[in-house]
């Protein structure tokens, strides 16, 4: 395969995703139309005006398929249907039509590494004999040890504990996540064929693209003896030699998908959720593969201009290497919200902080929100796609003090209550400052909302000068005009991250003291306090400036 394979490179008209602002919806927690406490597709449809007025180009909806919700829907029991809690296929069709009517594209989540243990194929496999065709669709092995009662290998699940679970007949099956999420065997032709059917099913229903879950995990080295891979947190090798992740074989699968995507007009886009090493990200993002890959490096960046600059430079170079566009993510449904991350000292262990119910250390929320707004404005100034997570446009913080009794993330139970998991960024959104569940729905909310959600409700911020919601709207609207600007050209300004794109500059003050405003006309600032101090940029602030054409050549 070759990145420039003739005939597979999308045309410009099909490239809407290259510089898109994509808004992620976690459907359980976005908006609840039927008042049962769980968000639904009709709720999403009812809030499309919010997304349109935000200026988003596309929405990506996390899984809404039939699921026991053992992992919030990333345990799919039927890939071509809608869970009754989220609605019906008819609701989906209405949502797709309405999304397009609002000028937005629609991306759905595809979960190909594993299904739910309630998927008919796994139920069949469980009931079938060892060595049967039904078991071959998943990854079954005999155990080790004298009676086979030790797991086939030392592989660990991401959510804690062994990645193998034993069935009563003695065989073990592999699950890189929860036991309720058995891994598919991608060497099995039924699996390959069925996912092509699923991709076609949703593409025919009008979806514009797919976010591909655990895209680097589908192909495993199952040659005996199984190799040891005890430490999931270590960095993956950059030669594809890990037994479980980022193996070259995954790209054959994506090449086949790409052919299917390109049968549609416009071609369906796809973005890989792959935690592959930076050097191998372009393999996922090339035109004859998925086309785009998430870059999560900003998620791990602390408030440090050098770190930001290195991450941005590397990401832009990697994307250029495969003629893709870079992606930027500050928050999503798996990580502590960035307004809280930036409210904590740089060295904070976020897991330990969550374990302390967000008490040690205490958040400095004013600082966190300033830095979050500055980081967002910086991110939106960059070329490439910006993926936003629901609620970040309201400046929501992590709900770190959820009562242990309400936690649903499998990480909580799988780690023996050592880690609280990801529920704190999944608390249903506050739409109104009062009323039942702050306007999330007519009833309650599946996770309790804290009282301070009311202060950050969308209704409270709508039209209010200096609000975070207003900042997102202004920035996304300006960005649209500016995205055709030139590539990033760095300007060395002490204490700051400063770059130019054509006649436009973005400067972020990472220092603890104010820095001078560069020459130019201020277009937008992340800090509402900026106006009173027109000649200096306060700490934790980003400004966008227009510079005069004759000044653009200097610097
Ligand atoms: C990544 C998803 O973002 C996460 O929420 C999920 O738990 C795992 N993949 C497993 O599907």
Image (cartoon, grey):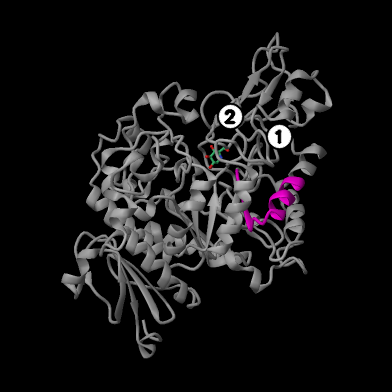
Residue found 48% across the figure and 78% down from its top: 485
Residue 502 in view, yes or no: yes
Residue 25, how many percent across, how many down?
Answer: 49, 49
Image quadrant where residue 157 sits = top right
Q: How far from the left and from the top, in percent, is residue 453?
A: 30, 44
Residue at x-position 65% and y-position 35%:
114
Residue of label 1: 184
Of badges 2 and 1, the one in the foreground is 2
Mark 1 and mark 2 in contact (Cβ < 8 Å)?
Answer: no
Q: How crowded is mark 2: few (under 14 residues within 10 Å), some or many (20 or more)?
A: some
As drawn, 475 above or below 198: below
The question of residue 212 being in magenta is answered with yes
Q: Does mark 2 have its CB less than 8 Å from ligand 1?
A: no
What range is drawn magenta here?
196-213
- Residue 138 locus on image (x, y percent): 73, 30
Secondary-structure class at tag 1: loop
Q: In the visual, does 483 lie left or right of 519?
A: right
Residue 85 image point, x, y percent? 55, 36
């Amino acid at each position: 395969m070759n990145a420039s394979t003739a005939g597979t490179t999308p045309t410009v008209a099909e490239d809407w995703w290259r510089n898109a602002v994509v808004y992620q919806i976690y459907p359980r927690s976005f908006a609840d139309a039927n008042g049962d406490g769980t968000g639904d597709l009709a709720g999403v449809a009812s809030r499309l005006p919010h997304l349109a007025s935000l200026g988003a180009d596309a929405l990506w909806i996390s899984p809404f398929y039939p699921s026991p919700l053992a992992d919030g829907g990333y345990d799919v029991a039927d890939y071509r249907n809608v869970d009754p809690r989220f609605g019906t296929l008819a609701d989906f069709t209405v949502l797709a039509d309405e999304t397009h009517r609002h000028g937005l594209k629609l991306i759905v989540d595809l979960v190909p590494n594993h299904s739910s243990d309630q998927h008919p194929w796994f139920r069949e496999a469980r009931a079938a004999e060892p060595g049967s065709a039904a078991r071959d669709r998943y990854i079954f092995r005999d155990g080790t040890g004298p009676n086979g009662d030790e797991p086939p290998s030392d592989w660990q699940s991401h959510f804690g504990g062994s990645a193998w679970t034993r069935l009563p007949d003695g065989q073990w099956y592999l699950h890189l996540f929860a036991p309720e999420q058995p891994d598919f065997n991608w060497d099995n032709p039924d699996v390959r064929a069925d996912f092509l059917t699923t991709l076609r099913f949703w593409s025919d229903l009008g979806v514009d693209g797919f976010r591909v879950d655990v895209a680097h995990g589908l192909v495993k080295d199952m040659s005996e003896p199984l190799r040891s891979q005890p430490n999931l947190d270590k960095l993956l090798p950059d030669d594809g030699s890990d037994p479980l992740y980022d193996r070259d074989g995954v790209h054959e699968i994506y090449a086949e998908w790409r052919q299917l995507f390109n049968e549609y007009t416009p071609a369906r886009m796809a973005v890989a959720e792959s935690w592959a090493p930076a050097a191998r990200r372009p393999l996922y993002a090339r035109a004859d593969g998925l086309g785009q890959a998430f870059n999560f490096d900003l998620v791990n960046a602390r408030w440090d201009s050098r770190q930001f600059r290195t991450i941005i430079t590397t990401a832009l170079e990697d994307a250029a290497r495969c003629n893709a566009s870079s992606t930027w993510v500050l928050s999503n449904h798996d990580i502590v919200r960035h307004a809280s991350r930036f409210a904590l000292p740089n060295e904070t262990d976020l897991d330990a902080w969550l374990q302390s119910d967000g008490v040690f250390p205490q958040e400095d929320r004013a600082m966190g929100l300033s830095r979050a707004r500055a980081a967002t404005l910086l991110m939106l100034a960059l070329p490439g796609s910006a993926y936003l997570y629901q609620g970040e446009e309201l400046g929501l913080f992590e709900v770190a003090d959820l009562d242990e009794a309400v936690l649903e993330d499998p990480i909580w139970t799988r780690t023996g209550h050592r880690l609280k998991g990801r529920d704190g960024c999944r608390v249903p959104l506050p739409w109104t400052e009062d009323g039942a569940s702050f306007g999330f729905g007519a009833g309650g909310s599946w996770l309790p909302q804290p009282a301070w959600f009311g202060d950050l409700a969308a209704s409270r911020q709508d039209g209010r000068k200096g609000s975070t919601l207003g900042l997102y709207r202004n920035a996304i609207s300006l960005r649209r005009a500016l995205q055709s600007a030139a590539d990033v050209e760095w300007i060395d300004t002490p204490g700051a991250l400063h770059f130019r794109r054509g006649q436009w500059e973005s400067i972020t003050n990472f220092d603890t003291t104010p820095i001078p405003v560069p020459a130019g006309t201020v277009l937008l600032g992340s800090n509402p306090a900026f106006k009173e101090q027109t000649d200096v940029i306060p700490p934790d602030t980003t400004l966008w400036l227009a510079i005069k054409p004759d000044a653009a050549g200097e610097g």
